[in-house]
Amino acid sequence: MHDDVTVNAADIARLADVGRAAVSNWRKRFDDFPQPVGGTATSPAFSLVEIERWLRRHNRYVEVAPVERLWQRLRSATDDLRLGEAVGFAGTVLLHLRQEPGLDGRALFKRLRKTTPDGLDIDAELVAAIVDVGRAENPVDVFDGILDRYAELHSRRLLATPRDVAKLMARIGETSGLVVLDPSCGMGTLLLESSGSRTLGQDLSESAARLAAIRLRLHDYDSRVETGDSLRADAFAGEQAEVVICNPPFNERSWGYEELTSDPRWEYGLPPRGESELAWVQHCLAHVRPGGTVVIMMPGVAASRRTGRRVRGNLLRAGALRAIITLSAGAAPASSGAPDLWVLRRPEAGVQPPSEVLMVNAGENLALAETAWQAFRESRDLPEGSDVVRIIDLLDEDVDLTTSRRISILGQPDPSSFSALREKAAALAKSLAATLPRLSPAQGHDRAMSSIGELARAGVVTILQGPLKLPGEGELPVLTTKDLLLGRAPTGHSADAPGLPRVERDDVVSPIVTGSGWFPRVMTESGAVLGPQLLLIRADPDRLDPHFLAGCLRAASGSRARPGTSVRLDPRRAQLPRLAIDEQRRYGDAFRQLLAYEDATRALREISDNLVAAGIDGLFHGSLYPE
């Protein structure tokens, strides 16, 4: 019987929403903590069933979602190095279920037994479990959930493109309804966001390519995904798509320089040995039809390295390079710096090459990137943070395409704003003291506590979660995680669809992943759709004060979260003191004032940074004079 799967200390910490140190302390402090049933001395494995019983006894239990339980069973079927094969097998089962909804799991096991990868502990019960969860939760959602967990576990190796960046690349490439190629497709994130009529992908990793193929088929794409090195063993040689989107590996020294020296793809010059990215650029251009678009992620240094200046110059002279868009650090997991998106068009015979190129300093403002590109294409006025640069001005000795050298950084303070910033900072600093609540010392004592899960079962609260994926562009406002962080009005948009959770006034909304700067907020307006990666808790106002709830959630997620850290929050595990509603409101008012103070200090810090920058720049350039 495989229901009793094993979990390690990291799994237990994630399930219980605590740090790994807490699990280690439990093992030392509690004699009844379950003994390891496998693993090694440094990485012991525990029975999930026994761990659940222990958590119940110690009032730390949280119901394990069906997809989570299935994920743990898949992990127990093999080691982490071959986990991709187990995930792929689960995807195959879910594909069969999608095609035959009435499928019997044990009968399917017999059908698939001969094709099961060697070394996986797959039996009829596991296949039946995959079928049962898929039938209950929807095969597509189940595979997406498993794949998300797999990508999270192997984030440093898989280097998946963030979904918001993938969507931006697809929109700039206008991929919808077209034949789209990604020659370094990984698990298919870019192709999945493309809405292409036909999608073609290739990846060096056999496991990633298989997962991409299954993922695209489950999402009803007409797709073909191949395994292999696209530069050395091009699976689509001679084939041209309408759009190519790509996030290739960066800084690859062994990309094939020696054996590919005379390759016909190097139309714009032989890529230098240390510039694999310029090989990928030309590979992508070779695979797009004349007039077709390429959108490719590039490391920031590729815009200025001296070794690549000849290729960059030729791309500019031919009119192939149309835009360079600088994003924020983290937009490309393969790079610790701020990467660029290069937008290219394959030149058409008889068409005059363009004389200008677009440059955008978008940072985290992905909407700016899209807006600037559309304005550039339609010859409209460009938004702040973007500009057109004459190609002739770029063709100097260095051919330096770094955007910050050509246009001002978005949001850089103007020295003329110094006086206004000074007055604003002074007024905000003066009001801070009045924002803080008065709190008196009290004798600490143990309080009776209730979990939010218990309150949900009692009907005191309702818990909703944002969808994994919104149905598409539309008129409905969407509250995003960034909106929650900045405390601003909803900026996202979505089409309507049944079951989308709507925000109401006094709802408490929190990100699923919390950490420094990310915390619950009480909503002041109704009507917006709850965005992905967000949780909503709606309380009965006569039994639970929303500001009290938000403060307790903040405490549960870590009021002193270290910068750069994050934890995964399940609100059902959070504990609240059992207080009368009048007492809750007193505490809730104090919580509200503390969080308002935090917002004010954050705003003051931002104003102070701009004030100092404006003052220093103004003094240096002579636009300000000391009185």
Image: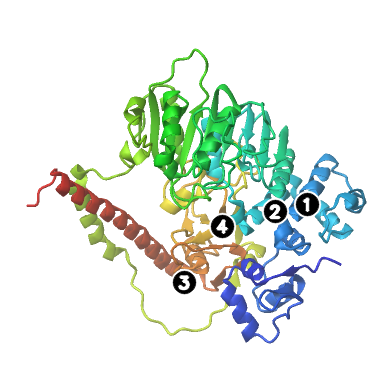
User: From the viewer's perspective, is the residue at label 4 or at label 3 nearer?
Assistant: 4
What SS does tag 3 mark? helix
Image coloring type: rainbow
Task: Tell me the CA gap for discs 4 and 1.
Answer: 25 Å
Please tell me whether residue 340 is drawn above or below residue 545 in the rendered image. Answer: above
Q: Is residue 82 above or below residue 96?
A: below
Which residue is pictured at 30% across the width and 39% down the height? 408
Residue receiving disc 1: 90
First of labels 4, 3 by sequence position: 4
Please tell me how crowded label 3 is: few (under 14), some (14-19), or many (20+) other residues with Cα within 10 Å. Answer: few
What numbered label is drawn on residue 583? 3
Front residue of 445 and 402: 402
Position of residue 617 measured from the top left corner of the image (x, y, whole percent): 20, 47
Q: Residues within 10 Å of mark 4 (few under 14, many from 20)?
A: many
First reached walking from the N terminus: tag 1 or tag 2? 1
Q: Marks 4/2: CA distance?
A: 17 Å
Residue for point 41% across, 65% down: 589
Mark 4 vs 1, N-terminal side: 1
Answer with mark 4 or mark 2, whichever residue precedes in sequence. 2
Q: Real-space Cα distance between discs 4 and 3?
A: 28 Å
Kindly identify the amino acid type of the residue bearing the numbered disc 1.
Ala
Say if mark 1 contacts mark 2, CB within 8 Å: yes
Eye-nearest disc, 1 or 3: 1
The Cα atoms of the two marked residues, 2 and 3, are separated by 43 Å
Judging by the rendered image, the residue that carries numbered circle 2 is 146
